[in-house]
Amino acid sequence: MNRRQFLAATAGLAASGLSAPRLAHADDNRILRFVPYADVAVIDPIWTTAYSTRTHALMVFDTLYGYDEQFQPQPQMAAGHSVEDDGKIWRITLRPGLKFHDGTPVLAKDCVASLLRWGRRDAFGQSLIAAADEISAPDDKTILFRMKRPFPLLLAALGRPSSLIPVIMPERLAKTDAFTQVPEAIGSGPFKFVPGERVPGARVVYERFADYVPREEKPSFTAGGRVVHFDRVEFNVIGDAATAAAALQSGAVDWVEQPMIDLLPTLRRNRDIVVEVKDPTGMIGHLRFNHLHPPFNNVAIRRVVQKAISQTDCMTAVAGSDKSLWSDRVGTFTPGLPMASDVGLEALGKAEPDYAALKKELIEAGYKGEKVVMLAGADVPRISAVCEVTAEALRQIGMVIDYVPADWGTVIQRITNRRPIDQGGWNLYCTYWSGLDLATPASHTPLRANGERAPTGWPDSPALEALRDGWLAAPDLAAQQALAKDIQRQALQDVPYVSLGQFKQPIAYRRNLTGMMTGVPVMTNLRKV
């Protein structure tokens, strides 16, 4: 469905009386009803980078460190730390009284097993593990890091607040292979997952964890005191954007994570609703390739695709003509943050690509008319919009596109398949990353290009990996920024993915919901008044 068709459809829905959907009203001040952008299809926060799972993780699990609103790591599960031997030995001590949801105490061995599992999958975690000689638990309260070399970003890695979060789970679960999903969601966070009330594609339920003891510091993003004011949180999965907006207007739900941009004027006119941007780093779209199979194992073909994609078209499809909500000419790193630059951006597609010339260039690059399977998250409007734009651009340059729309949960399951397309594999999909995740090479998961160990798509670029290692060892900000320019230049030549632009997604919530934090969705410190 294109943008005009969607607007026509939502107008029809509104006219048919969906302004008062048949959902339970949120009149109990001890219950928070939230509409996530997509279902929590996976409950294991180490197995997927999906942001619905990230939100789930921030409720169920805790981390050794958290980030404050200045993106600085602060102790969370940790009582504190000490550093010795010129930064090569770190000792982190756990706070007393920490418990998991199954009643068992949190021990240092649980933390070690959890971090080792996380470190197999996460970009930042892989760097930490590679720099360590040993991560161990000399006693129940101490986590010991013996590093091969100083690793000043250690606390930043342990506090990572977005995908993949270094959550702490019981050792028995953390010993699960990192590429296999854990069967339970047991953490020590402020809420407990209620598996018996989970309805796939419709509802996910959490209950307050009575034994959670928040820190005493002022709350700030994922750091400080995470105080719980709700006994129960319900994620109501509403695939239709107009129905979600109507539910918010009627008071059936309290918070819609990603209301469709076209519906914001209506929501803003409602005096009981607040519409605002809470994540200033925005969201950056990516077209992700499968590098293992033709045609995108050919870098020349990837470069042609990069030139065929108009970020202007992509962001207009997502957020309309209001340029205050979006940016094009977006490179490797988040615009406005220290690592961003305009180096090498001439490799990106123009606002109006020359499709006829690119069609010839594609053939010269070696494209032989292979069918290209493109997975499209049809139930997430911002993803569906850029999927349609990119698919049409690829058709314009002569690619044979097999467009496969599905719910986002199905997409994130299928993209783990490394086999060829005739065995259930894939070639392309579109996704988004929080600008926070793309701020630096350390946390920039889609930039990893270490082959079989790389994230979904499995790009392989020794040059990119060497530059990233150099950035991690850079002595100061100036050296980091110089290397970030080199990384961007190399990435735009190797094309592990294609950037689709940045937009800032407003949230919408009932005005009686107070305590909303800056950043990604956090359910603590909220209350209804």
Image (cartoon, rainbow, N blue to C red):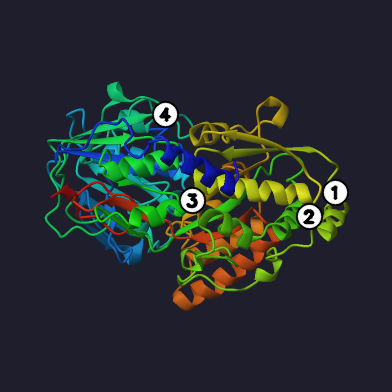
Q: How crowded is mark 4: few (under 14 residues within 10 Å), some or many (20 or more)?
A: some
Q: Residue 123 carries which label?
A: 3
- Report the Cα–Cα distance between label 2 and label 4: 39 Å
Q: CB of mark 1 within 8 Å of CB of mark 2? A: yes
Find residue 234 and report its horizontal and vertical position in percent. 27, 35
- Report the Cα–Cα distance between label 1 and label 3: 32 Å
Which badge, 2 or 4, is on the more N-terminal residue?
4
Q: Residues within 10 Å of mark 3 (few under 14, many from 20)?
A: many
The residue carrying mark 4 is: 201
Task: Examine the image and state in which quarter residue 406 appears.
Answer: top right
The residue carrying mark 2 is: 300
* Residue type beneath disc 1: Gly
Which badge, 2 or 3, is on the more N-terminal residue?
3
Find residue 107 and report its horizontal and vertical position in percent. 22, 38
* Residue type beneath disc 4: Gly
Q: Can residue 261 be seen in this view?
A: yes
